[in-house]
C-alpha cells in the first residue's frame, strides 16, 4: 500500500486560515446575537432597592426621581448614569449602584451630614464635615449650627479655621456663631455675645496665635473697667503689638467741660 503524499505547507496554511476565519465569524455572530437578545425588553428592571441611612429623603420619592432617568434593561442600564441620578437628589452625597440578579438595582446611599450653614441668612446652603458646600432645605436644620462664609472654593479652609478657633473660646463661655473669610483673605468672627472680632490675615497658626493672645489678656483689660468678657462689643486684632477693644458702657472720648 502506497504511503499518503504529505500535504503541502501552503495547503495546511490555507486550511488553518479558513478554520480561523470561520471560528472568528462564529464568535462575532454569537456575540451579535447575544447583544441583540440582551437589548430586547425581555429583562426589564423590576425594582430599585435603596440602602443606607436615609433620613432626609423618602425612599418612594427617591425612586420616583431616579427611575425616569434610567434607560435600558437590567443588562444595559448605565450604572454611572444611575449613580449620578441618585447623587443629584438633595441631601444625597454619594451613591453606589449595582445590579442585583435577576432584575433589580440596589443603591447604597450616603447622606450629607451638615456641620454649618454657608453664606448669608437668605442662602440655602450647608457645609458637610468634608468642607463641601451643598444645597439643603434649611428648615430641616438645627439653627444652633454656626454660619460660615467666604469664597466657595475655600469652604474647606473656612471649616478648618473654625475647628481651630472654636475650642479657644469655650473656656470663656463664648462660642463662634459666624466665621467669615473675605475675598482679600481677612478673617472675622461674630460671637454669641454679639462681639465682632476682626482676626486679620495670615496663616492659620498666626490667626490662632493672635486669638490666644487676645483671650489671655481681654479678661484683665475688661476687669480694669469693671466689666467682663461678655461686655466686649468688638475687637480688632489686626495690630502687630496689640488690639483695639470696644466695650459696652466704656468710652475713651473725653468731653471738654468748657464746651458744655
Image (cartoon, rainbow, N blue to C red):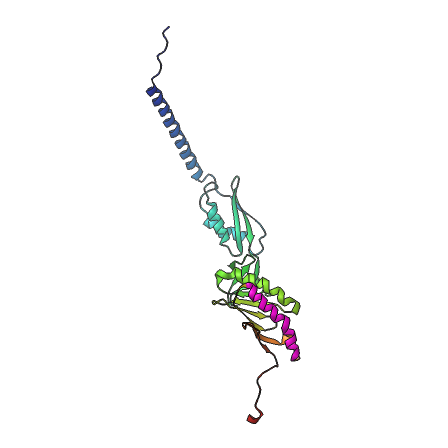
Asked if residue 80 can be seen in this view, the reply is yes
Q: How many marks?
A: 0
Residue at the image point whose x is 56% and y is 61% from the top: 160
Image quarter hosting the C terminus: bottom right
Residue at the image point whose x is 66% and y is 67% from the top: 171
Image quarter hosting the N terminus: top left
Residue 17 against residue 129 in the figure, above or below: above
Question: Relative to residue 212, is residue 118 drawn left or right?
Answer: left
- Residue 213 part of the magenta segment: yes
Residue at the image point whose x is 36% and y is 25% from the top: 17
Task: Locate residue 219, reporting x and y percent.
Answer: 65, 74
Residue 19 against residue 6 in the figure, above or below: below
Q: Which of 231/185 is in front?
A: 185
Task: Locate residue 19, reporting x and y percent.
Answer: 38, 24
Task: Locate residue 193, reporting x and y percent.
Answer: 61, 72
Task: Locate residue 93, reporting x and y percent.
Answer: 53, 54
The quadrant where residue 247 appears? bottom right
Asked if residue 142 can be seen in this view, the reply is no
Q: Residue furthest top?
A: 1
Residue 167 against residue 109 in the figure, above or below: below
Q: Residues in magenta?
A: 204-224
- Residue 142 part of the magenta segment: no
Amino acid at each position: 500500500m502506497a504511503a499518503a503524499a504529505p500535504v503541502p505547507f501552503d495547503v495546511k496554511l490555507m486550511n488553518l486560515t479558513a478554520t480561523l476565519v470561520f471560528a472568528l465569524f462564529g464568535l462575532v455572530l454569537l456575540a451579535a446575537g447575544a447583544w441583540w437578545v440582551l437589548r430586547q425588553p425581555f429583562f426589564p428592571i423590576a425594582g430599585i432597592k435603596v440602602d443606607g441611612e436615609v433620613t432626609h429623603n423618602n425612599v418612594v420619592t427617591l425612586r420616583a426621581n431616579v427611575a425616569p432617568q434610567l434607560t435600558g434593561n437590567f443588562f444595559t442600564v448605565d450604572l454611572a448614569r444611575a449613580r449620578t441620578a441618585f447623587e443629584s437628589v438633595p441631601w444625597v452625597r454619594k451613591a453606589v449602584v449595582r445590579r442585583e440578579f435577576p432584575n433589580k438595582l440596589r443603591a447604597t446611599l450616603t447622606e450629607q451630614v451638615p456641620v454649618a450653614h454657608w453664606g448669608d441668612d437668605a442662602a440655602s446652603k450647608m457645609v458637610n464635615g468634608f468642607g463641601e458646600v451643598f444645597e439643603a432645605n434649611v428648615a430641616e436644620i438645627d439653627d444652633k449650627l454656626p454660619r460660615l462664609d467666604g469664597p466657595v472654593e475655600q469652604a474647606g479652609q473656612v471649616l478648618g479655621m473654625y475647628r481651630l478657633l472654636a475650642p479657644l473660646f469655650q473656656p470663656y463661655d463664648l462660642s463662634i456663631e459666624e466665621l467669615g473669610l473675605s475675598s482679600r483673605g481677612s478673617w472675622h468672627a461674630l460671637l454669641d455675645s454679639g462681639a465682632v472680632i476682626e482676626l486679620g490675615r495670615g496663616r492659620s497658626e498666626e490667626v490662632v496665635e493672635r486669638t490666644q493672645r487676645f483671650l489671655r489678656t481681654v479678661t484683665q483689660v475688661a476687669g480694669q473697667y469693671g466689666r467682663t468678657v461678655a461686655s466686649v462689643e468688638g475687637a480688632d486684632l489686626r495690630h502687630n503689638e496689640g488690639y483695639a477693644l470696644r466695650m459696652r458702657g466704656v468710652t475713651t472720648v473725653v468731653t471738654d467741660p468748657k464746651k458744655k
